Image (cartoon, helix red, strand yellow):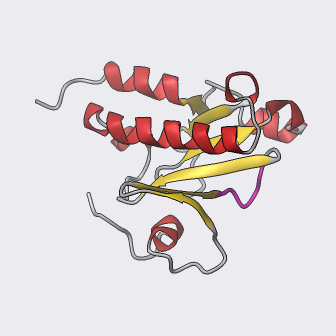
Amino acid sequence: MQTVEKNCIFCKIVRKEDSKTVIEHESDNIVIFKDIKPATEFHYLAVPKRHIKNCKELTMEHKPLLDEMKESLEQLLAEKGVNVAEEGLLGFHWPPFNSVKHLHMHGMGPRSRMGVIGKLIFKPNNKWFCTNDHVFEWLRNQPSSS
């Protein structure tokens, strides 16, 4: 697995080669920025700095990364005034329903302000969008790599 992909838009954002994207949060492992097609008032993407194609490339060794993505998105949403427990939504598009082939966790809210299309696209745990809990459960059920 490569660290970055030359032509991946999210890798370009990680490398700060996209001057239009404002990074809202950055750590050694991830960056968070606004989604260019927000489904509600606050809609962010947490992206690992290392290029991971999608959820199906994840292993249990990635759990700390996923935990950081989740916790950072929840903190950012809370700072924006979103009651994450009641109005937040975090999750991933499940392959092959990925518009960008770089793992990204959506964090958005308030859910009550989502339009009809957003509610369809981001309906939890269907064949194209799943919550982080669903991904963690899927990981637990994968055969061990050792």
**Residue 110 in the image, given as x and y percentages of width and height:** 80, 35
**Rendered residue at 44%/47% (across/down):** 54
Residue 31 falls within the magenta-colored stretch: no
Of residue 67 and residue 131, the one placed in the foreground of this image is 67
What is the quadrant of the N terminus in the image? bottom left
**Rendered residue at 81%/44% (across/down):** 40
Res 128 → quadrant: top right
**Which secondary structure class fits the magenta region best?**
loop
Question: Can residue 128 be seen in this snapshot?
Answer: no
What is the quadrant of the C terminus in the image? top left
Question: Can residue 61 be seen in this snapshot?
Answer: yes
Q: Which residues are magenta?
A: 34-38
Residue 145 lies left or right of residue 48; in this view the side is left
**Residue 82 in the image, given as x and y percentages of width and height:** 75, 36
Res 18 → quadrant: bottom right
**Rendered residue at 37%/54% (across/down):** 29
Of residue 143 and residue 44, the one placed in the foreground of this image is 44
**Rendered residue at 75%/38% (across/down):** 109
Q: Is residue 137 above or below residue 131?
A: above
Of residue 67 and residue 39, the one placed in the foreground of this image is 67
Q: Is residue 15 above or below residue 10?
A: below
Residue 57 lies left or right of residue 107; in this view the side is left
Q: Is residue 64 above or below residue 99?
A: above
**Residue 17 in the image, given as x and y percentages of width and height:** 51, 80
**Residue 100 in the image, given as x and y percentages of width and height:** 55, 58
